[in-house]
Image (spheres, rainbow, N blue to C red):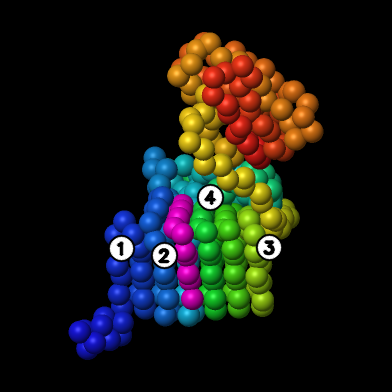
Amino acid sequence: MTIILIACILTGYIYEDSDSLIVINDTLVICGDHDYARKVHITDHSVVLVRPWLEGSDSLGRLVLSAPLIVIQDSSLLNGSFRGYGGGDNSDPHGFGPGYGGAGNPGGGGGAGYGGNGGQGGDNAPGSGGSAYGDPADTLIERGSGGGAGRLGGVDGFGGNGGAAITLRAQDVIIDSSDIESHGERGDDGGLEAGGGGSGGGIMIWGGTVTVHNAILSASGGNGADASFGGGGGAGGGRIKVFYETVLDTTNIYFAVPGGSPGTGMYGTPGPGTSGTIHVRQIMLIAEQSHTHEHAVTVYPTLTHGNITLQTAEIPVYVVLHNCTGQRVKTVCLWRTRTDLSVADLDAGIYFVHTPGASRSTNKIIVLK
């Protein structure tokens, strides 16, 4: 048994079931949402690659790993670089994604945006740079957008792809002597007009305890490419978010979300991409108390920035929302067993849901992003 185990480790080993994902000295290509009952363990120079985005598929170009324990160690790499939204090409010269770079007409392609803005391309009618999107401080993470293509009658240089969206969610997250990256891609050089860079992607770590030692987390914007007439615009940097509930332990850690540099050409002045965003904060999640009685109203999700759903077996029933100072902010009467309620009009904060007069009490805490 010992000989077999050593042989597996030397040649590489990947194991996955509903309990665990284990990668030892091997390369795994993966995408979408993965929830494990025990752990994720990536070690011994392993490489985990996000499967590249393709139009029409939501799972491609993003990766969510969830487990009670996530460990990435021993010079391993979680890599989403160039695997987000696609850059402009022959089928669609504009880049893809909310912050896509525009195609030149004629001119260099614009750099894409996500955490930062993309720069415009060069020449007389350059592609516009893409705008930043998303909230730097909320608990959402997105793919980086693609850069625009350089054009002169037809597509010349293709735009660069954006970086993927990567999320690690666990009770304990440990990253030691390993890196996570999701860079945007440099645009392609063109004969006359060059492509714009793809924006940096998104990296989010969320854990009860987060330990990061000797690691680099980076999501740089791609550079614009070079051409004789119009260079491509540089792309905006991505977003990095780290949320911890109790402990954040870091030593020798480096975050990087720079914008991409512009390309070169004889005409016009391509623009650089601007830097992305880095957000690190403690986040409070209030666990529900265990009671022997049932709630009059069930409320979910407990963390939202738009809507909540109220379910009840007792109708009609009044539901009242109070803020943390005790002020009543919303009252609704439920006439159906399931009701969707918008809370987008409320300020960010903690809210308590009560059912006065119901036969069973409800005391649910909502944290709005």
- The secondary element bearing badge 4 is classed as loop
Disc 1 residue type? Glu
Q: How far apart are marks 3 and 1 (CA)?
A: 35 Å
- Give the residue number, with chain letter if any, for mark 4: 143
Residue 63 counted in the magenta span: yes
Q: Is the magenta stretch mostly helix, strand or loop?
A: strand
Between 291 and 239, the one nearer to me in the picture:
291
Q: Are the residues flagged by discs 3 and 1 in contact, CB closer than 8 Å?
A: no
Please, is residue 142 above or below residue 28 in the view? Answer: above
Disc 4 residue type? Arg
Q: How far apart are marks 1 and 4 (CA)?
A: 25 Å
Between 343 and 193, the one nearer to me in the picture:
343
Query: Reading the chain from its start, which is encountered first: label 4 or label 2?
Result: 2
- The secondary element bearing badge 2 is classed as strand
Q: Position of residue 153 (x, y in %)?
A: 51, 44
Magenta segment, which residues?
62-73
Residue shown at 31% from the left, 56% from the top: 18
- Give the residue number, with chain letter if any, for mark 2: 40
Please, is residue 353 above or below residue 111 in the view? Answer: above
- The secondary element bearing badge 1 is classed as strand
Disc 2 residue type? Val
Q: Quadrant of residue 350?
A: top right
